[in-house]
Amino acid sequence: MRRREFLRHGSVATGLVMVSGGCTLPSFVGTRGIDADIAVIGGGVGGCAAALAACRAGRRVVLSEETDWIGGQLTSQAVPPDEHPWIEDFGCTRSYRQFREGVRARYKADPNLLATARADVRLNPGNGWVSRLCHEPRVALAVLEEMLAPHVASGRLVILRNARPVSADTSGDRIGSVALEVGGTGRVPVSARWFVDATELGDLLELARVEHVVGAESRSDTGEDRAPEHADPLDQQAATWCFAMDHRPGEDHVGTRPERYSYWRDFVPSLTPPWTGRLLAWECSDPVRLGPRRIGFDPEGRIAGPNLWTYRRLVDASLFAKGSGRTDVCLVNWPQNDAFVGPLIGPGVTEAERARRVWDARQASLSLLYWMQTEAPRPDGGTGWKGLRLRGDVTGGPDGLAKAVYVRESRRLRAEFTVVEQNVGTDARMKATGARREEVTAEPFADSVGVGAYRIDLHPSTSGRNYVDVSSLPFRIPLGALLPRRVENLLAGAKNIGTTHITNGCYRLHPVEWNIGEAAGAAAAHALGRRTTVRAVRANPAELAGFQRRLRGDGFELEWPRAVRPL
């Protein structure tokens, strides 16, 4: 790539500042590409946290992101944070807490926010009941950008947006460089001493031929009671294309009938145990009992009991002054738009097939909206709410939906250590240890680099399995799960760590992914400073203890600070 062309990529794709007719570029950006200390491939939740940790340690970092929004689940996928019950007090890293405080500060700076809401130290902007911090994706984006801005300004960090990894150059057990297709206009080679794979689907594992697992392992492979009898790489959780909407009573916002509407309107999931009828209905499978579950929907709040309107609501208009222009904004990530359209990765899944399935997931969501506008049963006996309106201004994506599809599992590293159900599942730990429910704890990993908590929550899968939603214990994140068995300069930094299909169900949520990514960035920086490998740090008790002291100093919690109950 000629220098003029690369500088243009630098100024446009990285957001570097143009001054005096020229481009201010960090010293590690050259005419032939980028040569960084640490390359974080994937700018989602884990990727942002990895970049923060590596920059905090003074390292030169490049962070790439496939869309034009960093933040992944929090932003481009539009999913409010799924968190454990103790998140306001403990159970996350200091930087994740700073992110949460930054979100609240943005809302409290709005002059239209009511004084009572501004005084609430635990303000939940959407008052959704799935999360203690339901908020708009653009707010999360602004906070993440603000957290990274000092490192961009100092020249330590380059962010490449609209940048997709397309190839990796490897030599023996090391990755030398990764080629990124930037904005569809050219390739930028990125060389680094360490790489973190924080992509949504574990793409770097595939490109660099790093040993990994896809789909479900067999019961004989993992010893997990809830694993299937036979391994199935195409057994993957349903993907969801989320969208935001508001309701304008008396207005008609019904658009063009979606191309696949007839299919999705009449679609009956073929699952074991059985689903309860059509997907587009106000009755679905209860995730725990797997029997029929009735759930209400009414944007005007005229029903008793659970209401999908407030489930993942991003904005509660009642928190703002009348005349502010604020309306309730509802985020739709429901059982009704889980798309059972086939696996997105795995043996025989081509790029064309993935693109078609992702398109069909988008059609599933557009069809759900159209059904709610035109045919859905209302509590008053009528059908449809014509005033339901897509809020593409909130999500910024195609067709008024989110920018990217929400995927719940990716390729998973064949790691130095793989977390299995026997380490974190409540029933499995009771069986393995003989402890009573009120006494049982998760495996106390000695190489802990953080903590997390969530139920083992698997959505219906592409192989025809219904929900798996069972109790788990507040757990630790073992460093060994971030480490490949063979490759020496790669760490997993997202949902691609060494978990199984089962335990991915509790290690995949926002604060856990943040902790994983932040630990990966910190580990790579620590290894560079010690002139060693992360594998060697983990293997040496004194070195591991030194690294863990550093993590604690950076605001990591490596164990649960008090007795906590199973979830």
Image (tube, helix red, strand yellow):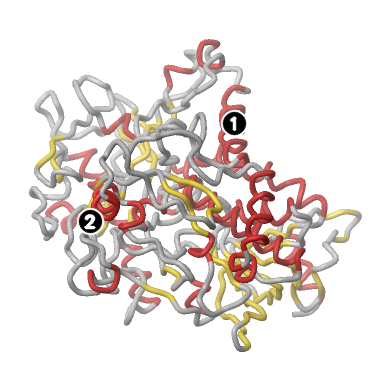
Q: Is residue 409 left or right of residue 200?
A: left
Q: Nearer the viewer, residue 412 or 66?
A: 412
Q: Nearer the viewer, residue 419 or 303?
A: 419
| Residue closer to the observer: 133 or 69 | 133
**For the residues marked 1 and 2, what is the alpha-carbon distance in whole angstroms?**
34 Å
In the image, is 195 to the left or to the right of 327? right
Helix, strand or loop at mark 1: helix
Q: Are marks 1 and 2 in contact (CB under 8 Å)?
A: no
- Whole-percent x, y for residue 330 in the image: 36, 34
Q: Residue furthest right?
A: 20
Of labels 1 and 2, earlier in sequence is 1
Q: Residue furthest bottom?
A: 172
Pointer 1: residues within 10 angstroms few (<14), some, or many (20+)? some
Q: Position of residue 18 (x, y in %)?
A: 83, 55
Q: Residue 396: x, y in percent?
A: 50, 47
- Amino acid type at mark 2: Pro
Displayed quadrant of residue 193: bottom right
Left or right relative to 332: residue 490: right
Looking at numbered disc 1 in the image, what kind of residue is underneath it?
Glu
Q: Which quarter of the image is occupied by the N terminus?
A: bottom right
Task: Provide the residue designation for mark 2.
Answer: 460
Quarter of the image where the C terminus is located: top left
Q: Is residue 225 above or below residue 301?
A: below
Task: Answer yes or no: is residue 395 visible.
Answer: yes
Q: Which mark is residue 101?
A: 1
The residue carrying pointer 2 sits among few (fewer than 14), some (14 to 19) or many (20 or more) residues within 10 Å by Cα, namely many
Q: How many labels, in total?
A: 2
Query: Residue at left 83%, top 62%?
Result: 25
In the shown orientation, is residue 2 left or right of residue 567? right
Q: What element does badge 2 sit on? A: loop
Percent position (x, y) of residue 362? 33, 56
